[in-house]
Amino acid sequence: MVGPESLESGPLLYLPLLTIRVSAYFHLYLYRQPITTGYFYTYPLSEADVASIAFIFNGEGNLLLNCTTLNVVAWISFCLPKEMAMLGLDYKDRVLALKKEKNAIILAHNYQLPEVQDVADFVGDSLALSKNAATTDADTIVFCGVHFMAETASIICPDKRILIPDLEAGCSLASTINSHELESWKKEHPDAIVVSYVNTTADVKALSDYCCTSSNAVKVVNSIPEGREILFLPDMFLGAYVAEVTKRKNMYIWPGECHVHAGIKSEDINRMLATLKNADFMVHPECSCTSSTLYHASKGDFERQAFVLSTEGMMKHARSSRAKQFVVATETGILYRMRKENPDREFIPIKNDAVCKYMKRINLEKVHNSLVNDVYEVKVPAQVADKAKLAIDRMLAII
Ligand code: 13P
Ligand code: SF4
């Protein structure tokens, strides 16, 4: 539990003299002391004021009350409704209460910290989160994921307030291409259809014909007439996977990668294969080992099953497979949900250091701050949002 003394700001850490005075007078009132004759003195023992001591004397100089700040806090929580009562609760309870009060929902990506997943109304992959944003009645969506995901929600629901708890929650993959680079690439292939992975900025989406996520990329590409060239961006491993599965020969792939998944290599898969004989292997298509996994699987090299799946595809597979042991080749945050939903199964990360530092920037304290102060709003300008929405709507229509 996060104790009240660890609050970053707000009324508790530097408890103002006035609140001590108010609650001390209330104390005196309860004990029927002649408060008009009392006077008040605080002695700050520490910088944090946590150990402050309040002395109240009457007119004759007799001590009427001596209490520590913590005693006073207890009185405040007891005496004053709502805001003060909130001080006695930990961040989780406060976040849950604020959600109700503000008609807000929390959407969390599968890679988020456990403490964030636990307060979310919905946890899922990029596609499921976008769909959820599109249908919610909430006034505010606190998007616990990375910036492009919050932008997507803002494009889908322009009338809602979309908040991200930390503006630095970016994405190394989305940063591999900007709108100028895409414009030049389009000039080289003027008749091509542009398919952008959802891990892109709103500006890039606005220049795209389709968006896709890892769970519907194959279907999106299959929906495009065979004769049309495709520019697929920005993930080269996902692109190679889609080209392999769809057998498209006219697909050009941007050479972008995600720093977390590019680090999951075929050697990691092979090492695990050598030791875990009965496990199912679940591999995210952004991994650099995706192509070799597919290749070996198609040649029947694996003694057991290997599956290339989006994060939500992995969740479904974990539920439906008969295997009891699973090797998970993606960001490790998803293991929390897997273990929680399938306590009788074993989930083993392919690499313990497959951690997205951007996803992990968000924690419960920042979610709380987001709800209290309505920060940080993500709003995509209308002229960009209108164009990007066409590509996103096409993605949402292809499940
Ligand atoms: P999913 O769409 O599978 O959730 O993946 C998003 C992502 O950022 C993977 O790194
Ligand atoms: Fe981006 Fe990679 Fe993090 Fe996913 S895991 S959000 S692709 S940096």
Image (spheres, rainbow, N blue to C red):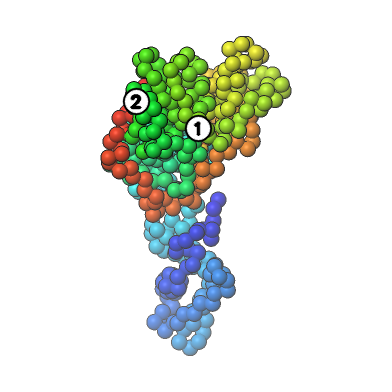
Residue 273 versus residue 131: which sits nearer the camera? 273
Return the x and y of residue 57 as percentages of the image width and height: 49, 82
Q: Within 10 angstroms of label 1, few (less than 14), some, or many (20 or more) residues?
A: many
Return the x and y of residue 298 as percentages of the image width and height: 58, 12
Residue lying at the far front in this picture: please name it: 188
Nearer mark to the viewer, of 2 and 1: 2
**Which label is found at residue 389?**
none
Residue 261, can we see it? yes
Q: Residue at x 44, y 29 (%)?
A: 233
- Neighbour class for label 2 at 10 Å: few (<14), some, many (≥20)? few
Mark 2 and mark 1: Cα distance apart in space: 21 Å
Front one among 204 and 77:
204
x%, y% of residue 212? 41, 27
Question: Where does residue 41 sit, x and y in percent of width and height?
Answer: 49, 80
Residue drawn at the location 54% of the way across and 77% of the way down: 43
**What element does badge 1 sit on?**
loop
Residue at the far bottom in the pictured view: 60
Residue projecting furthest to the right: 275
Residue positioned 40% across, 30% down in the render: 185
- Number of disc labels: 2
Please tell me which residue lies in front, 35 or 140: 140
Residue annotated with mark 1: 256
Task: Identify residue for label 2.
Answer: 190
Q: Amino acid at mark 1?
A: Gly
- Mark earlier in primary sequence (2, 1): 2
Residue type for callout 2:
Pro
The answer to whether the residue labelled 2 contacts the one labelled 1, judged by CB atoms less than 8 Å apart, is no
